[in-house]
Image (cartoon, rainbow, N blue to C red):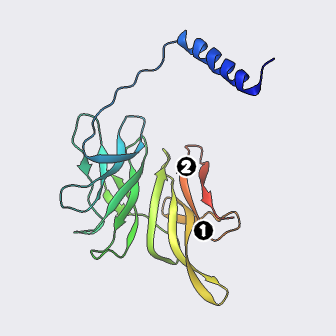
Amino acid sequence: MYTLQSALRLSTLSLLLATSAFALPRYTLEDLGAALGVALNASGVAAGSVLPGSSPQQAARLQPGTLPQPLGFLVPNGWISLASGINDAGVIVGLSATDTIGCCARGFRLTEATGMQLLPTLAGTTSQSQGVSINNGGTVVGFAVIEIPQGETMVTVRRPMVITGTQASDLGTLGGLEGIAQYISDAGDIVGESQL
């Protein structure tokens, strides 16, 4: 008689025996430098950030065999920028300071041709927005921090958004006030999180 515990052991053993008949994938680790990669495209180019010496954290393009390429800021002498998404064309999205005092950061889109450009955002955005992911069609998802009425007061919330071309749209939530869109597929399917 098998107990649940012995059945699990038997399944694990049969899985090990089945996989040993096939070659397991081999991976190669490559040093991308003093950087944090958070997104990867089909060509092996990563988007992330670097902390270059005493300079502020910067969005960066990371490629095997080359030094991390800091991407700068939306404003000169910005205090932070972070890359969080990249598509197969190498278009990078993230957030960058829009001031020099640590107040505000907004979403950006960066291409080789245009450099870093401010992303559209939702009406009422206060201090922050971010492009989190971009698909191969160029559609961006992320969030914007906006003020909305709650009873007789205004509250600051993070709202999920999608950006198509020059238009940002609020995706709504599952009933709560806040959410964030975290990934968009090439088919346009979006995943994220939401308050209930």
Q: Amino acid at mark 1?
A: Glu
Taking 53 as reference, is 146 above or below it? below
Mark 2: secondary structure = strand
Taking 114 as reference, is 102 above or below it? below
Query: In the rendering, at what x and y percent does residue 44 appear?
Result: 37, 35
> Looking at this view, is 37 or 111 the one in front?
37
Mark 1: secondary structure = loop
Tell me the tag on residue 178.
1
Front label number (1 vs 2): 1
The residues tagged by marks 1 and 2 sit, at their Cα atoms, a distance apart of 18 Å
Q: Earlier in the sequence, mark 1 or mark 2?
A: 1
Left or right of residue 188: residue 66 = left
Residue at 39 percent across and 62 percent down: it is 95
* Residues at marks 1 and 2 touching, judged by CB atoms closer than 8 Å: no
Query: In the rendering, at what x and y percent does residue 41 appear?
Result: 42, 39
Query: In the rendering, at what x and y percent does residue 43 appear?
Result: 38, 34
Q: Amino acid at mark 2?
A: Ile
> Looking at this view, is 151 or 138 the one in front?
151
Q: Residues within 10 Å of mark 1 (few under 14, many from 20)?
A: many
Q: Residues within 10 Å of mark 2 (few under 14, many from 20)?
A: many
Taking 41 as reference, is 12 above or below it? above
Taking 181 as reference, is 178 above or below it? below
Q: How many marks?
A: 2
Query: In the rendering, at what x and y percent does residue 188 appear?
Result: 59, 48
Residue at 75 percent across and 27 percent down: it is 4
Left or right of residue 91: residue 153 = right
Answer yes or no: is residue 112 visible: no
> Looking at this view, is 61 or 150 the one in front?
150
Label 2: which residue? 184
Q: Residue furthest left?
A: 53
Residue at 41 percent across and 21 percent down: it is 26
Answer yes or no: is residue 91 visible: yes
